[in-house]
Image (cartoon, helix red, strand yellow):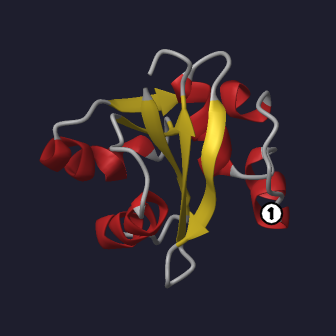
Amino acid sequence: MIVAGFGFRGAATVATCEAALAQAERGQPRVTALAAPEDKAPLLAAIAAARGLPLIALAPDVLTSVATSTQSAASLAARGTGSVAEAAALAAAGTGARLIVRRCISPDRMATCAIAEGPST
């Protein structure tokens, strides 16, 4: 499983998230699922539907239990994790997942996307 995880601000748009995903996907295997915190997942529904991918909504406690490669002060303060995108990707990809793309930031700095590979791929 190859999962693109997202973190984004309240003012982010679908286009912002698509831009972050496009950056993260460059030269990577095809993403097979999208993931985000459960309160943010609805914004990604259009992207998931357009790509025919499952959308995994994650509870806050799941995200805070995942160690991330990068550390954002804003993410730590808001969500209790260094990178919401990395935590979402790793948690959704399953036990033993590894990060293959660290968080990429959208050009407008409103969204991040990271990609993790689960052990079952």
* Residue at far bottom of view: 108
What residue lies at 56% left-to-right and 18% top-to-bottom?
A: 119
Residue 59 visible in this rendered orientation of the protein: no
Residue at 38% across, 72% down: 19
Q: Is residue 47 left or right of residue 81?
A: left
Q: Residue at x 72, y 26 (%)?
A: 61
In the drawing, does residue 115 fall left or right of residue 23? right
Quadrant of the image for the C terminus?
A: top left
The answer to whether 1 is drawn above or below residue 9 in the figure is above
Of residues 52 and 59, the one nearer the viewer is: 52
Q: Element at badge 1?
A: loop
Q: Specify whether 26 is left or right of 105.
A: left
What residue is rendered at 53% in x and 26% in y?
A: 93
Q: Can I make out residue 27 in this image?
A: yes
Q: Quadrant of residue 73?
A: bottom right
Relative to 8, residue 121 above or below: above
Front residue of 75/33: it is 33
Q: Which residue is mark 1?
A: 72
Image location of residue 10, percent across then percent down:
51, 64
Q: Amino acid at mark 1?
A: Ser
Q: Quadrant of residue 78?
A: bottom right
Viewer-proximal residue among 1 and 109: 1
In the picture, the quarter occupied by the N terminus is: top left
Q: Residue 47 at what x, y percent from top left?
A: 25, 52
Q: How many residues crowd mark 1 within 10 Å: few (<14), some (14–19), many (20+)?
A: few
Q: In the rendering, at what x and y percent does residue 12 appear?
A: 44, 69
Above or below for 33 versus 11: above
